[in-house]
Image (cartoon, rainbow, N blue to C red):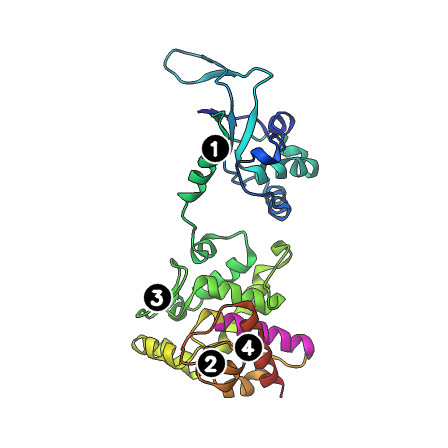
Amino acid sequence: MYLVLPTLRVVNNTMSPDMEPELEKSQRSFDPAHSKGITQYLVQNPGDYVLGAIQYAVDTEGEFEEIEDGSNMGMLYLPLEATLRSIDGQHRRRAIPEALSQDAKLDNDHLAVLVYVEPELEKRKQMFSDINWNQRAVPKSVNVGFNIRDPFAHAVNEFLAAHPELDERVEKQKSSVRRGTDKIYTLGALYDALRRYIVGAEGRVRDPGKFQWQYLKDRANELFSFVFARPELEEALKDPSVTEDKRVESILLNGTTLKMVAAALYTVQQKDKSKTLKALAPKFAEVDFRPSAEMWQRSGFVALGKTTPSARNQEVRAAMNELVAELTS
């Protein structure tokens, strides 16, 4: 294995992203949207981006000349007929030329490239599998807690910093709220809810940079203050020991429901700008969030005999439409 540190310009000029026939690919299918997202990240953060090493396999060891005996540093010479095969990093590699076309100053930045000596296709496939199989996905809550680039994450974290009584009841390390804890929502659920309150049911934001975090912080305060005015949430905040009981009694103590409510409020306000949260508060106070409530059963949001809602898009949308109808009736 060799570690080389070429500039982005050298990578772009000498390491083509199309280095293997379709039948000899040893990694996943290419996703243009993912590559475009990396390009955007590079261009928007030219001074402090972090780009992981891209990895190739070469079918010959070539020649390596050490600068000094035992240093393991020197010059690697690969013959012109050597075949390079991409193992991992095709999206980063394909993002580079577009980023360079948008910002030429990136040309001289260096990128780590790992080159493995491995001519066999099956072993290259196994290498790709090993790289990804042994990775552990980082929970969204952890990413949101650490992210200061994303204005939505920044806004939620700032909102919680201003509300310590709620902050300590938010799960920031795990992907879900475990039974028996006094946590009410995950940080990821609050983040997703804010996005849905701003852009709608899908929560997709193509360019987060166009939103000011202070504006989003104000909207977060608006949304979560509105939701936490519900008695079951007020009681859970006041007395952590009743949290689990309230979770069974009301589906509002569930991240999926919180996101559905945020999307419903967005939909209502898009239909009628006069429907401020203050104007909607009386109607919202009357909504029945018991799992057995007819509107949740009718929409399939909560299955008969269950106490937690379904996270499937179809049922979430049906529940959102039910809530919109309830709030606008």
Tag 1: residue type?
Glu
Q: CA distance from mark 3 to mark 1?
A: 41 Å
Kindly tell me whether residue 171 is visible in this rendering: yes
Residue 44's quadrant in the figure? Answer: top right
What residue is pinned by disc 3? 178
Residue 211's quadrant in the figure? Answer: bottom right
Query: Under tag 3, what secondary structure?
Result: loop
- The x and y percentages for residue 29 are 58, 43
* Mark 3 or 2, closer to the camera: 3
Q: CA distance from mark 4 to mark 1?
A: 47 Å
* Mark 3 burial class by Cα count in 10 Å: few <14, some 14-19, many 20+: some
Query: In the rendered image, which quarter contains the C terminus?
Result: bottom right
What residue is pinned by disc 1? 122
Mark 2 or 1, nearer chain start: 1
- The x and y percentages for residue 31 are 61, 46
Q: CA distance from mark 3 to mark 4?
A: 24 Å
What residue is pinned by disc 2? 229
What residue is pinned by disc 4? 319
The segment highlighted magenta reads 257-271
Query: Under tag 4, what secondary structure?
Result: helix
